[in-house]
Image: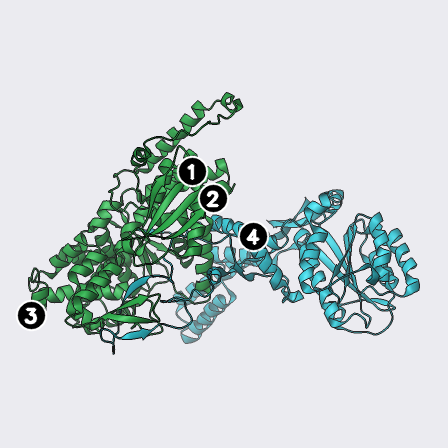
Chain colours: A green, B cyan
Amino acid sequence: MTQTQAVKLPRRKAKVRPLFDGPEWTFDLLLKVHDVMGEIAVGELGLDVYPNQIEVITAEQMLDAYSSIGMPLMYRHWSFGKRFARDEAFYKRGMRSLAYELVINANPCISYVMEENSMTMQALVIAHAAYGHNHFFKNNYQFQMWTQPDHIIDYLSFAKSYVAECEERYGDEAVEAVLDAAHALMNQGISRDLRPRPRNVAQHERERAARRRAYEEETFDPIYRTLPEITRSGPEESPEAANEQRLLGLPEENLLYFLEKHAPKLEDWQRELLRIVRLLSQYFYPQRQTKMMNEGCATFVHYEILNRLYERGLLTDGTMLEFLHSHSSVVFQPTFNDRRFSGLNPYALGFAMMNDIRRIATEPTDEDREWFPDYAGNGDWMGTLRHAWAEFRDESFVLQYLSPKLIRDFRLFAVQDDAKESAMAVAAIHDEQGYRDVRRRLARHYDVATQDPELQVTEADLSGSRRLVLTHRVRNGVLLDKTEAERTLQYLAQLWGYRVKLVETEDDSSRVLKEHEALPMP
Amino acid sequence: MQIVDRRLNPKSKSLGNRQRFLRRAKAEIRDAIKDSLKNRKVSEAEGSEKVTIRSKSLREPSFSMGRNTGRRDYVLPGNEEYTVGDEIPKPQGGGGGRGGQGSPDGEGQDEFTFTLTKEEFLDLFFDDLKLPNLIKVKLKDLKAPKTARAGFTTDGPPARLNHARTMRKSLGRRLALRRPSLAEIEALEAELAAAENEDPRDEAKITALRSKVEHKQRLRRSIAYIDPIDLQYNRFDRVPKPTTQAVMFCLMDASASMTEPLKDLAKRFFMLLHVFLMRYYREVHIVFIRHTSTAAEVDEETFFRGTETGGTVISTALEEMLNVVKARYSPADWNIYAAQASDGDNFHDDMPRCMQLLDKEVLPICQYFAYIETTHSERFSDAQETPVWHGYAEAGKRFRNFAMRRVASPEDIYPVFHELFSASDKAA
């Protein structure tokens, strides 16, 4: 496969003194390696990165970071404790090793490196995370559009203290109930089409929360609590229900946003908690959309940087062999019938595609000229890559750049699986007729929007029964997992406060396939 | 670029999360612990615990695509033989596609294994259990002062001299003042002797060496090997401390009718009681007394393993206990707990004597007396009421520090224990 071809040792200059030798690392060495790599990454490859901040942590701290979804700061919640306990058990039994690094899309870009890594691994991590991922975060349009790396750490610190404050004011259990429900709906907390307004500075958020509470406290008057509750008599159905729906902005795909703005029974602090979870979910959305490209970019960059260092005699042979060993296990792709197979490895495919783009730009075949006329043989492979890294996400990247040669190399084939049939059918393979089909199907596989169920709030009756109706547009007959859906719907009902109904309708005919309902429990 | 060393940051950042997690899964964890109790040995009573829970309260549901409906596409690597139109049989066992969702509601997915620390284990294990009548004794003994180690001091009685520390200071001082070692002086002397032998006329060299030797010897004389300022003594403070010592009497019928399974039940109960008392008292002494028609104090091994034949006279055990109390554990200084296990048999004529001992002597000095009757049968009815049970039931009515329960299987142990020591129960 491609990666084995790519792994060939270049000739090393013998006269230059290597940057380091042996496994021990020091802070000075990290700094030196970072700077030397910077000359290659920025000076030669033309990468554009945020300033780097490298943090040395222990294995326990790495586990910590794992369990709080890779963030340096996180509010407290039992599910993070659960994740920690699980990961710790796996780690202690040796069933899983920890990642060598973790990188946070922030400005400055924070990379965690573990203290037990050897110097070679530290160098690999710096090249991979501090230059590769860093460049991708800064330049990819998805990240530019959806995330505010300048503010994320501030925002997290606001979120953490706000949740702690709520726990103190309203009790752990009340806060937990809201967060549990919000976490269940996290994947439905994304606005896919709207661009969020670029603000959310921690200071701003804190002030907003404080204003909200101050207003509440000002207007609090115990006398009103003595009044009997007004019960409305007779139905006051608005004649123009449709108008109301329009005012609510229905249909709305962002369930958390809708609940935050319109759920009738929620207190203000509960709305704020929903907002925190929603913004986090939105922050991670670009990562889910660009997983393969992001890893491919970082892997390509570390491979390029380390090879260039080696060519200049700055790395020893031992270092290079250690690096190649771990590099090749990272980009290993087992075949579908292998026991180790668990889907396409984003590192493997990403790295192979980046190398392929370089090959097409420098040594194209006739086939490549036919498929990629706009850049085949243009010679500027780095420019082509930088453009791809900036302007695409996984789905469009595959659609645009996956070449017939790679489909052949990976021996990709498409399979159709119908739950009603007893066998799966092979729909396309790596041949002349199949290339475009395989590519199209693979691209769709990387489209997060088609991988998540498509749910929308379609009706909300605010003046009458207060019933909320969600619609799941069923594509290809794939219904929701019943138990999971009902449990999640229960959480949704807790937040909404009244009856909630979920209708699954067929995409093209709007025929109702299934209905679920949930009532809030007192 | 900057490098930050986070390794020294406070540890256990996720402690808050863990506490929330444990609280959440408390009921399930306690069930799991209860199960694990069945397989533990007495010596393993304490220690960290690996628990596997299947928890409803730890679910994190989300809207996800079902596996068993509809049509979906996969793109897979590594095609070797297939062409368009070929059929691949689906993997057996699973519902469809990949991944095994065996049971219809996916319950199997929730199982979860992790390790509790010793403290967490015990906290959960003895959660809301209280030691009855503890406060009274604590208050009574509050004034008894205890000596406790409190660092070091420069003077004190010779018996408290701390040799290691004294020598360390002495060594430091000698190094600082450059006290010449014996070997050093001997080397110089040898050099001097050599110089004299070699060339006795080289006055200058010999005098220089000689004065050097004298200087060193003078230094060695004037700088003491151990100086009074080196002396370090262990220091003790007198701290008023509540006496937290308890003695626990384990009384068991060792006659032939107590079979191995019945003894095992008793053993588990004693083990629990021991761990529980350890949480409250700094020091817990255990006295094992077993009896047939005679009673004797024995060690743990004999108590649990040894067998004996003979009749059953319970009063002998009570008498033995009173003897031991008299000899070693004055009720004024010790919290006395007793647990008795038997299968309910007693020599017919012995019951009145037993009751008299209990009423007059044993119960008044005990903080708590628990009687556990082990039995083979699952159900109890009045028809099966044993002589001991019948007699003890009377005492139970008169004394609040007396409790009795029946245990038929290892599963009962924890609930029974919980019942005996449940905090709310005692408060009522």
Alpha-carbon span between mark 3 and mark 1? 61 Å
Q: Which residue in the structure is indicated by mark 2?
A: A519
Q: Which residue in the structure is indicated by mark 4?
A: B26
Alpha-carbon span between mark 4 and mark 2? 27 Å
Q: Residue furthest bottom?
A: B81
Chain for numbered disc 4: B
Residue type of the residue flagged with mark 1:
Gln
Alpha-carbon span between mark 1 and mark 4? 26 Å
SS at circle 2: loop
Q: Residue furthest top?
A: A223
* Marks 3 & 2, CB-CB < 8 Å contact: no
Residue type of the residue flagged with mark 3:
Asp
Q: Which residue in the structure is indicated by mark 3?
A: A366
Chain for numbered disc 3: A
Crowding near the residue tagged with mark 3, few <14, some 14–19, many ≥20 C-alpha atoms within 10 Å: few
Residue type of the residue flagged with mark 4:
Lys
